[in-house]
Image (cartoon, rainbow, N blue to C red):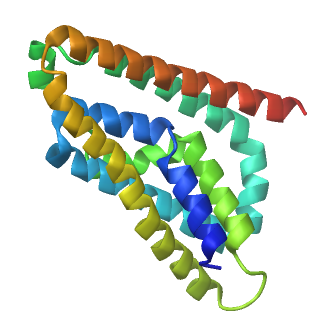
Amino acid sequence: MIDTAFVSYVTVMSITPGPNNLLLAASGVNFGLRRSVPMMLGITLGCVVQCALMTSMLAILLSWMNVVRLPMAVVGCTYLFWLSWKIYRSGTPKEGEKQQPMNMVGGALFQAINPKAWLMATNVAILFTPPDGNMLHHTLLICVGFALINLPCILIWVVMGDRLRQALRVEWKLKLFNTIMGGMMALTALWLLVGEVRHALN
C-alpha cells in the first residue's frame, strides 16, 4: 500500500502546479515563508482529511461524488477565478499592509472546493486501498504517508515564493509576478472546469 507507486503518485500530484501550489507561491512572495506556514499546514491537513474520507467511505462517497461532481467543480472553479483576481490585485504597498495570507483553517477548508485535491484523494483511495483487511489501519497509514509526502512538496512552492520576494521588491516586478500567477490560476480553473464539463457530457 505505502510503496513506490504511492510515493510517486502523491509526490507528482503534490508538487506539480495547481490551485494549492500557485496560491502558496503567491503567498510566499507577498507575505513570506513564516506567515504562509499556517496556510501550508492547513492545505496538507485538508488533503489528509479528504484521503481519510475517501479511503474509509469509498463506495458511498464515489456514488455521491457522481451526483455533485459537476456542481462542486463549478463552485470550486468560480472560487478559483475569484482567487485569481485577488492575486492579480495584490501587491501594491497600501493593499499589502491590509492583506493577510490564508490561515490554517482556510487552507484546510479550501480543499473542499479544490477539484485537483478531490481528484488526488479519490485516486489515492481507489489505487492504494486494499480490498480487505483492517480499514482503520489502512486509512491511518495512507493519511500519515500522504502528509509526510505532501508537506515537503508544497513547502517547495512557499520557499520559492519567499526567495522571489527579495527580487520582487520593485513594485512593477511584483505586479508582473502577481499578474502571471493570477493568470495561471485562472487558466488552471478554466482547464479544470472544461475537463469536468466534458466528463459530465460523456
Tell me if 25 is positioned left or right of 120 in this view: left
Q: Nearer the viewer, residue 175 or 83?
A: 175
Residue, far right: 202
Q: Looking at the image, which residue sits at the far front?
A: 167
Residue 140 placement (x, y as % from top left): 52, 80
Where on the picture, by quarter, is residue 58? bottom right
On the image, the x and y values in percent for residue 169 come to 12, 20
x 81%, y 35%: residue: 199
The structure residue drawn at horizontal position 16% and vertical position 11%, both measured from the top left corner, is 171
Q: For the view shown, which residue lies furthest in the bottom direction?
A: 133
- Relative depth, front residue between 4 and 84: 4
Number of numbered discs on residues: 0
Quadrant of the image containing the N terminus: bottom right
Side (left or right) of 132 relative to 80: right
Q: Residue at x 53, y 41 (%)?
A: 114
Q: Residue at x 73, y 67 (%)?
A: 127
Q: Is residue 110 above or below residue 181?
A: below
Residue 28 in sight: no
Residue 1 shows in the view: yes
Q: Quadrant of the C terminus?
A: top right
**How far across and down, in percent of the image, does residue 165 sit?**
18, 30
Residue 35, compared with residue 59, is above or below; it is: above
Residue 65 placement (x, y as % from top left): 72, 50
Q: Against 24, is 132 above or below? A: below
Q: Is residue 177 left or right of residue 168?
A: right
| 46 up-or-down from 23: above or below | below
- Residue 181's image quarter? top left
